[in-house]
Image (spheres, rainbow, N blue to C red):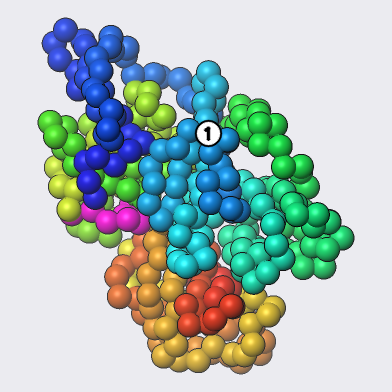
């Protein structure tokens, strides 16, 4: 990844407590007075927007752009991170990445077609129950109702195509989000990397989302699935320094002890000893109701969990009883990082218009 990747600001502090801001792309650096890292928690909401390209440009300011594009909205101490699957439908992984990061979805429907159906299946397999349906081109709720029946999308709120009102409602919801309370906060944290790059004078920067627990500045973190470790030099949330990162936070980590070329998308920065990294995945599958037949050994499926999208081969399939709920063992080329009981999404890229297979609950 390039050090000119947009969307992240790194601060260099000198002895006079001034900082230099590295904006990254086609913008001059600027200097301003540095304030101490924040001890309070900013509320953030991660939202997947699936619709026409650049639909989200009125929801927030564009940030990092690759196969997934980020848009950021901020109001006082409240932030919204919008993720668009920029390369979908060409790349199914683009849709998976956007949805896997999200706490809420906005599905913009211009046409009832195979892409709409595939997106509904992906949202259902991800268990993303919080969402909004924006119907356009005179599509009515009655037209989509039979197509979303029995899925999580059936419970989505139907909204007009008013992006300014959508933006305000997202910020209001983000302000009420309390991901900082509860048992999950007291546990060791895990941050999943989606982008990474070197910054001259700083070192390695990793962008991603905190998926569980809390992470603190100066923590020594394992870099799973590798045996390496890295020290967390600083944390930023939407351009503000912070001491602690909480579940749901969109963050930038400045890392010491590891080079950018030693990282990859999907790597997990963590102190959590309970996480597993393995190339042998075993568990109970649950296939979508439209899947045409039983899975067979030696089929190549892609396993999606967090920001990981790994090819694997079915080494063992037990279809006894209901073939829609087989016992499966998948052998992947690279190690998958996951907690016990996690639910991964299975994809079959040779499936034509039906590429979402179902889920696998990992033992």
Q: Which residue is at the far right?
A: 142
> What predominant SS class does the magenta segment belong to?
loop
Image location of residue 38, percent across then percent down: 39, 19
> Residue 329's spot in the image, x, y percent?
44, 81
| Residue under the image location 52 percent in, 65 percent down | 89
Picture residue at 63% right of the left edge, 33% below the top:
167
Residue 132 in view of the camera = yes
Q: Which residues are magenta?
A: 262-268
Location of residue 40 (image quadrant): top left
Residue 121 in the image: state x and y as whole percent: 64, 67
Callout 1 crowding tier (Cα within 10 Å): few <14, some 14–19, many ≥20: some
Residue occupying image coordinates x 28% and y 28%: 27
Tell me which residue sits at (74%, 52%) in the image: 136
Is 313 placed left or right of 341 in the picture? left
Q: Is residue 232 visible?
A: no
Q: Secondary structure at mark 1?
A: loop
Q: Is residue 318 left or right of residue 159?
A: left
Circle 1 residue:
60
Nearest the eye: 167 or 360 = 167
Front in this rendered view, residue 331 or 23: 23
């Amino acid at each position: 990844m390039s050090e000119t990747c947009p969307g992240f600001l790194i601060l260099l502090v000198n002895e006079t407590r001034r900082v230099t801001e590295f904006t990254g792309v086609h913008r001059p650096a600027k200097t301003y007075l540095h304030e101490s890292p924040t001890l309070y928690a900013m509320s953030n909401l991660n939202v997947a927007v699936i619709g026409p390209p650049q639909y989200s440009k009125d929801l927030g300011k564009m940030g990092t752009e690759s196969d997934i594009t980020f848009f950021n909205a901020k109001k006082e101490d409240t932030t919204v991170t919008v993720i668009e699957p920029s390369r979908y439908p060409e790349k199914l992984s683009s849709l998976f990445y956007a949805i896997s990061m999200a706490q809420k979805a906005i599905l913009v429907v211009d046409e009832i077609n195979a892409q709409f159906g595939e997106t509904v299946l992906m949202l259902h397999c991800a268990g993303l129950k919080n969402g909004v349906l924006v119907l356009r081109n005179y599509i009515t709720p009655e037209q989509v109702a039979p197509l979303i029946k029995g899925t999580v999308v059936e419970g989505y709120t139907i909204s007009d195509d008013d992006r300014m009102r959508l933006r305000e409602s997202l910020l209001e919801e983000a302000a009420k989000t309390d991901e900082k309370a509860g048992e999950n906060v007291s546990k060791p944290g895990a941050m999943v990397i989606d982008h990474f790059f070197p910054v001259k004078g700083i070192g390695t920067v990793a962008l991603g989302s905190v998926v569980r627990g809390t992470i603190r500045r100066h923590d020594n973190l394992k870099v799973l699935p590798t045996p390496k470790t890295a020290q967390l030099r600083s944390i930023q949330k939407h351009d503000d320094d912070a001491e602690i990162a909480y579940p749901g936070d969109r963050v930038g980590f400045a890392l010491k002890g590891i080079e950018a070329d030693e990282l990859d998308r999907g790597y997990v920065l963590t102190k959590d000893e309970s996480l597993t990294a393995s190339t042998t995945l075993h568990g109970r599958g649950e296939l979508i109701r439209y899947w045409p037949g039983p899975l067979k050994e030696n089929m190549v499926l892609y396993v999606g969990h967090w920001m990981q999208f790994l090819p694997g081969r079915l080494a063992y399939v037990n279809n006894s009883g209901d073939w829609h709920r087989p016992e499966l063992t998948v052998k992947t080329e690279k190690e998958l990082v996951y907690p016990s009981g996690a639910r991964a999404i299975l994809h079959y890229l040779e499936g034509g218009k039906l590429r979402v297979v179902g889920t696998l609950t990992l033992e």
